[in-house]
Amino acid sequence: MKLKTIISLLFLMLFLNFSYAQKFVKVKKSEYKIEDEGFKEAWKHVKKGSHFFKMNKKGAFSEALNDYLTALNYNEDNAALNYLTGICYLKTAEPRKALKYLDNAYFNYAGVSDDIQYWLGMAYQYNYKFDDAIDNYEDYQESLSAKKFKKLQYKINKRIEECESGQKLMNKPVRCFVDNLGDGINTKAPEYSPVFFFRDSILYFTSRRENTTGGKKNPHNRMYYEDVYISKYGNGKWGNAQQMDYPVNTKHNDAVTDISPEGRELCIYRGYKGNGDLYNSQYKGDYWKKPGKMNRINKGNFRESSVSVSRDSMVLYFISNRKGGQGRQDIWVSYKTQDGRKWQSPENLGPVVNTKYNEETVEISSDGRDLYFSSKGHNSMGGYDVFKTHREDDGTWTEPENIGYPINTPGDDVFFMLTPNEHFGYYASDREGGYGDKDIYEIVFLGPEKPVMISKENPNDLIAYFAEPISEADIEKPVNIKVIQLSTVKGIVTDALSGEPVKATLELVDNATGEVVKVVESYASTGAYTVPLPPGKDYALTAGAPDYFFHSENFVIADTSTHEVIRKDIQLQPMGVGAKIVLNNVFFDTGKSTLRPASFPELNRLAELLVKYKNVRVEISGHTDSQGSLGLNQKLSQRRAQSVVDYILTRGVNLAQIVAVGYGETMPRADNATASGRQLNRRVEAKVLEK
């Protein structure tokens, strides 16, 4: 069984930003009060917020933030209140928002606190403004007394090194897409530790939601206890997550770690007062058994969290804060005895991989040679970054490599895992653009870049798909070329009924010229596809697979110099009786039934389908919006349906296979009161009558 990663977010967040203690700055009533109206109520929020702030706990900072933001509505220029608000943002889920308030505090009173520039540096770092961050860190360092300089120099230099790493990593970004898994999985609460059972398209993960089992917060961090959730993939998206029942979830922290390949063994982390242990639960019949401790992995009052076991089940990697490590939390390894019956004494993975900082969340590759983990050390750009190290033939590990930006951010990036084919990755991050706290993201790796070269004189002329180095002797005359930034269309193709991935052929046509500009296939295992396309064009997209109706649609990519990513998930209808599709690429002039030439490629595909499946009989139906009279709309829809049938019959289709029916305005798909609704209602459909 391969065990993956877990962690109690209790400890993940305990060391996030708390290596440097924040200072409480008192908001003076005389400086805060600007008028009588509203003061009394606002002052209550100041005092309440300060009460939570002094608790120095992650959940308490969130509560303090709510009160401070309310208090700022009364006096938005108070330096102390802006300072405290900025610190709260740095300690919670949206640290990038701290910059506005810390900047206001410094602007209104630079002496609000002697550490204001340290926190400003951190706020700039979270916003990728690394030069400004370094300036503030250095200014703060210069302001310190000799005693404080000696105490804090190392920590400040570490922050500066993180900013320098961030600059280098952003200059060489990884070719990938990072996409949020959506609101079926993610909420304003933290979500993390994704565990996939690929055979049944099931995702297990951990969250700290208000409806946690027991409904209580952990007194150590004032956050809700962890529970395990489950979601199933179908119809092109992840379904709404459901909370697992007892005995998997209890009233304390329960975090999923992994599931066995056959889906019958679940690994769980359980912790309460600082330490934590690993447990296994077996699936029997239709329920999960009470989890039992992994006693040969757990040790006394120490904490064991992230775990990954090699495919042959002979090597186990895990995270522990036990004695004998390089820092607070290290990666350890244990080997099974030759008879495979028990684990031997763990060994520290050593100083090449482990640092004096925290390591977290381990994942061993399927071949047992590459280890992925998160660390605050090495060349992190801030918080936990994901790293990769390779095991050489002699058993030594290579210097860990940061897997790069935009996967890694100045915040926390943890719980990284790869799919078996290594085309996709999944992890948890508190990156900007999420639903709240940490969210679970999908990474699509694009592979090596293949730049497209396009004529500067005529951007429509494709010169080459690959840029190859050439010698001076090869050039007969100068060619004026430039490399342009392509946009990307990507998505997943699935069966509309089962939600299973489909290997489909996708064709992209330039609607202006009718030229096929790209043909690609989606992956059979995932249904995923990626297509680079020049911007500034109107495209027709068609996707098809054996025994399915084809899917078609139109879209425009704006003419822009920036890289645009367009997501188009496609559901293909199996060709069963009653299956129906909209022929999106069939066009008529307003009020007429004559087909435009741009319709022919779409109708040719339908004709080819009917020629191939001669036992299939379809209805071609015409539909209109509600503009005009009922009688005229009925006649127009019938004529349009008949025009489609007449054309298809010219392509070798048997007359008995196809019939035209006009429904007029009687079967709307959307509200006719809006222009967009009327556009959806004007359509031609194909429906299977017999097969």
Image (cartoon, rainbow, N blue to C red):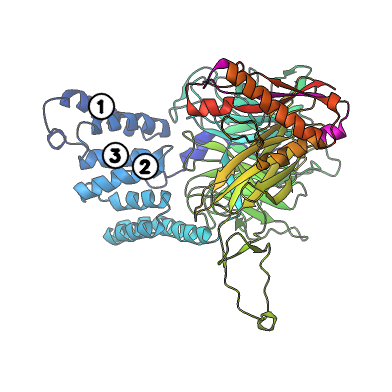
Indicate the amino acid at tag 2: Lys
Name the residue: 58% across, 24% down.
Answer: 681
- Is 37 displayed left or right of 412 in the figure? left
Which residue is identified by label 3? 84
Q: Position of residue 600 (x, y in %)?
A: 71, 40
Q: CA distance from mark 2 to mark 1?
A: 20 Å
Q: Position of residue 423 (x, y in %)?
A: 70, 47
Q: Position of residue 96 (x, y in %)?
A: 40, 44
The reply to whether residue 387 is in sight is yes
Q: Nearer the viewer, residue 439 or 414?
A: 439
Q: Nearer the viewer, residue 598 or 501?
A: 598
The reply to whether residue 2 is in sight is no
Bounds of the magenta span? 609-630
Sequence-earlier tag: 2 or 1: 1
Which residue is identified by label 2? 97
Indicate the amino acid at tag 1: His
Sequence-earlier tag: 2 or 3: 3
